[in-house]
Amino acid sequence: MKKMYLIILVFILIGLNSVLSKAKSENSENKIEDILQGATKTALEYKLEKSEKVEIGEIKFKVKKANLWIKEKNTDKKKLNEFAEITLPGKLYNPSKRILTIEKKEVNRNTIEGAVASVFSANKSGDLDWIVDNFIDKDKEKIKSIFKDKKILDQSQKDTEKIISTYIYGQADYKGSVLVFIEQDYIERGKIKESLALKKTEKGWKVTNEFVDDKTFDVVFAAVSAGEVSLKGKESPKENSVKDSKS
């Protein structure tokens, strides 16, 4: 981000020097002053636009039980309108972090943003080896067996190609992993939100499927996609367990 900001400023200064030289040759002191003011304003506006506010604290996840994947057996239909609620330590970004498509040679899993960019870029490319390499070692064989089905691989590629933009708007810590909140804008489906679980490995951040049957992750995923995600406060996080509420 800082590198990009510096590049933008360099282009602003290059353009400024070019225009200043022309203005000087025309002996126009007023124009030089106007240009300086305009360039300063542009640089400040860009800095303000790109300034990032991170809200750190206790993230509350709240969603109707009807939206959960893992449902209790013999659940009364009336209870499906009740809410499941949990809190986890985490942070929200304002503005959200834009994730751009990258090439395989550009993969950098040292950051969560880089890992997420690798995941969706790999799916878009249809490169099976790249897709598999985005997962922790424990999950690789299963992922490879799934995507060996060309129909599934092609469908994944087609779906990813319809994504207009991808943003990370927050994350939460859970059992040694990071649950990332992602918002994507699709050509036909509009905005879709989901959560991705990442684990730090010796080779950087990678996707983990260890929470497939985890009730807490189920609430997080459902709340991100169809419920409420909000900063509860900056006090110490409470116990990370699923709680039920009727309000």
Image: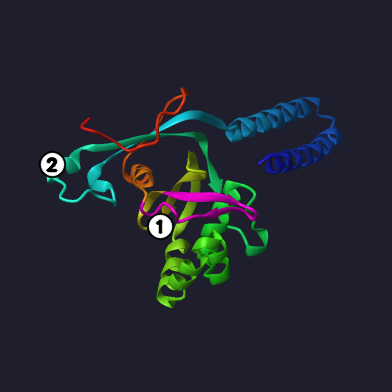
Q: Nearer the viewer, mark 1 or mark 2?
A: 2
Disc 2: which residue: 78
Disc 1: which residue: 187
Work out which quarter of the rendered image holds the C terminus and state it.
Answer: top left
Label drawn at residue 107:
none
Look at the image and name its color scheme.
rainbow
**Residue at 39 percent of width and 54 percent of height:** 212
Q: Is residue 98 magenta?
A: no
**Residue at 63 percent of width and 63 percent of height:** 104
Dividing the picture into quadrants, the one containing residue 44 is top right
- The answer to whether residue 156 is left or right of residue 23 is left
The picture places residue 69, in percent across and down from the top left corner, at 29, 52
Q: Which residues are magenta?
A: 195-213
The picture places residue 35, in percent across and down from the top left corner, at 73, 31
Give amino acid for label 2: Lys
* Residue at disc 2, secondary structure: helix
Q: Depth check: 129 or 188 in front?
A: 129
| Contact? badges 1 and 2 (CB < 8 Å) | no
* Residue at disc 1, secondary structure: loop
Dividing the picture into quadrants, the one containing residue 107 is bottom right
- Whichever of labels 1 and 2 marks the residue nearer the N terminus, that label is 2
Give amino acid for label 1: Ile
Q: Is residue 197 magenta?
A: yes
**Residue at 47 percent of width and 25 percent of height:** 236
Q: Residues within 10 Å of mark 2 (few under 14, many from 20)?
A: few
Q: Depth check: 4 or 9 in front?
A: 4
